[in-house]
Image (tube, rainbow, N blue to C red):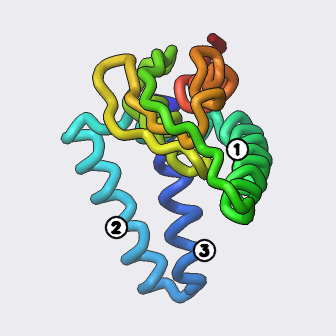
Amino acid sequence: MGYFLGLLCALVVFWYTMSGMNEPLILGLGAVSVIVTMILSWRLKVVDADSSPYGRIIAFLVYWVWLFIEILKANWRVIQACVKADLDINPALVKVKTVCRSDLAKTTFANSITLTPGTVTLAVEGDKLLVHALYEEDAEPGAFDEMDALSARAADGRHK
């Protein structure tokens, strides 16, 4: 029920901020569209923790700030590699095991790896991700543990 109410509040706020209209006809049409969307979501059984993660917005914000800092650090390392006279990269392919349970958490983790310069997620199979890294030392077994734990906490709402 909490997810249903969270989705309802999010849809109302989103609709009102996008329209900005206060005319009765427009407000009525907006209410009808929100009600139809809620009925369809309920009938399709798509209202769950993955589709409405509003209760974990603080954890997501913390994660995004942390990820932004990691992206800046990785950018600096890739820029240094590009401007050096000799190309000293040592690429590697590794399988990374994740503690993420939901599809949302796995997608968040995989996309975070890809967003970080120098690493790309190539495939997700169950609880393992195939990752390509420019530097072998950046792809060691524990290299992604912090990102994995933070994405699991943000998306799944749990600790490692």
The quadrant the C terminus occupies is top right
Q: Out of 111 and 155, give the one closest to the viewer.
A: 111
The quadrant the N terminus occupies is top left
> Which numbered disc flags the more N-terminal residue, 3 or 2?
3
Which-is-in-front pick, marks 1 and 2?
Answer: 1
Residue under label 2: 32
Give the amino acid type for the residue marked by disc 3 in the picture. Thr
Residue under label 3: 17
Give the amino acid type for the residue marked by disc 1 in the picture. Leu
Query: Are circles 3 and 2 on residues that touch, CB within 8 Å?
Result: no
Q: Is residue 44 left or right of residue 160?
A: left
Which quadrant of the structure image shows residue 57?
Answer: top right
> Which numbered disc flags the more N-terminal residue, 3 or 1?
3
Q: Secondary structure at mark 1?
A: helix
Residue under label 1: 67
* Mark 3 vs mark 2, CA separation in Å: 16 Å
Confirm whether residue 49 shows in the render.
no
From what the image shows, is residue 79 above or below residue 124?
below
Residue name at image x 55 percent, y 31 percent: 155
* Mark 3 vs mark 1, CA separation in Å: 28 Å
Q: Out of 14 and 105, give the one closest to the viewer.
A: 105
Q: Secondary structure at mark 3?
A: helix
* Mark 1 vs mark 2, CA separation in Å: 39 Å
Residue name at image x 23 percent, y 50 percent: 40
Give the amino acid type for the residue marked by disc 2 in the picture. Val
